[in-house]
Image (cartoon, rainbow, N blue to C red):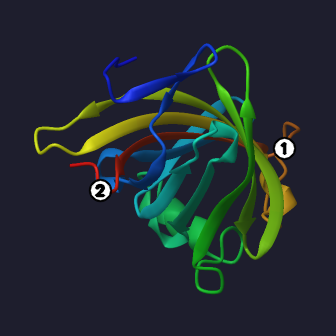
Amino acid sequence: MAMTEDVRIIGDRLAPLPGRWVIDATHSQLEFEARHLMIAKARGRFSDFSGTITIGDAPERSSVEALINAASIDTGDPQRDAHLRSPDFLDVETYPVIRYQSTAVRPGRGEHWEVDGELTVRDMVRPVMLDVEFGGSVRDPWGKLRSSFFASAEIDREEFGVTWNQALETGGFLLGKTVKVQVNVEAVREDSD
């Protein structure tokens, strides 16, 4: 973890300075993984997303909002990506945006934080808890203060109406229900020069 004068200690945890932070999508990744054929893992990412992180004087008063362009899903296979954009999965023509809005922040295990929130996919809103680790803060060569955050969650895609699947002759299904999400965020503090 980067240690600079641009962080603070809350209890026994490092935390970013208060303020509004804007996600730098160029230096951030939003990735996911799901089971395929019961034995393998299929991975992908969303390439177009934006968001803000508002850090409160008390970290528990912080919030996160992120917007994801559903059509930006990319698994490296154009045919599979077209199917994932179709009404069988994300139905991006009808539901172009995936949204995450936090509802609460609290200390988690070790140096981690737990962020409760509401995830909206296909206009269905479900609670999703993110396990978040603060990676530290540093000033870039242009004087802007940057912080990193690593977050992960597991969601049940069927809770969002994404139920398409195919039974296998050998038993089981083509796709798993659980989707693991991993987010690596680099954010820039507004007015940090």
Other-residue count near label 1 (Cα within 10 Å), few / some / many at <14 / 14–19 / ≥20: few
State whether residue 52 is above or below residue 42: below
Mark pair 1, 2: CA separation: 59 Å
Decide: few, some or many residues near mark 2? Use Cα within 10 Å; few <14, some 14-19, many ≥20: few
- The answer to which of marks 1 and 2 sits earlier in the sequence is 1
- Label 2: which residue? 191
Q: Residue at x 71, y 67 (%)?
A: 121
Say which element carries label 1: loop
Pointer 1 with pointer 2, Cβ within 8 A: no
Q: Looking at the picture, does residue 3 appear above or below residue 125?
A: above
Residue visible at 51% across and 33% down? 150
Q: Is residue 165 visible?
A: yes
- Residue lying farthest to the bottom in this orientation: 94
Residue 100: mark in rendering:
none
Left or right placement of residue 181 versus residue 9 in this view: right
Callout 2: SS: loop
Q: Residue at x 63, y 52 (%)?
A: 63
Which quadrant of the figure has residue 145? top left
Q: Given the current orientation, which residue lies at the most extreme left position?
A: 141
**Front-lying residue, 39 or 118:** 118
Q: Which residue is mark 1?
A: 169
Q: Is residue 175 left or right of residue 24?
A: right
Amino acid type at mark 1: Glu
Residue 29 x %, y %:
42, 45
Q: Quadrant of the N terminus?
A: top left
| Badge nearest the viewer, 1 or 2 | 2
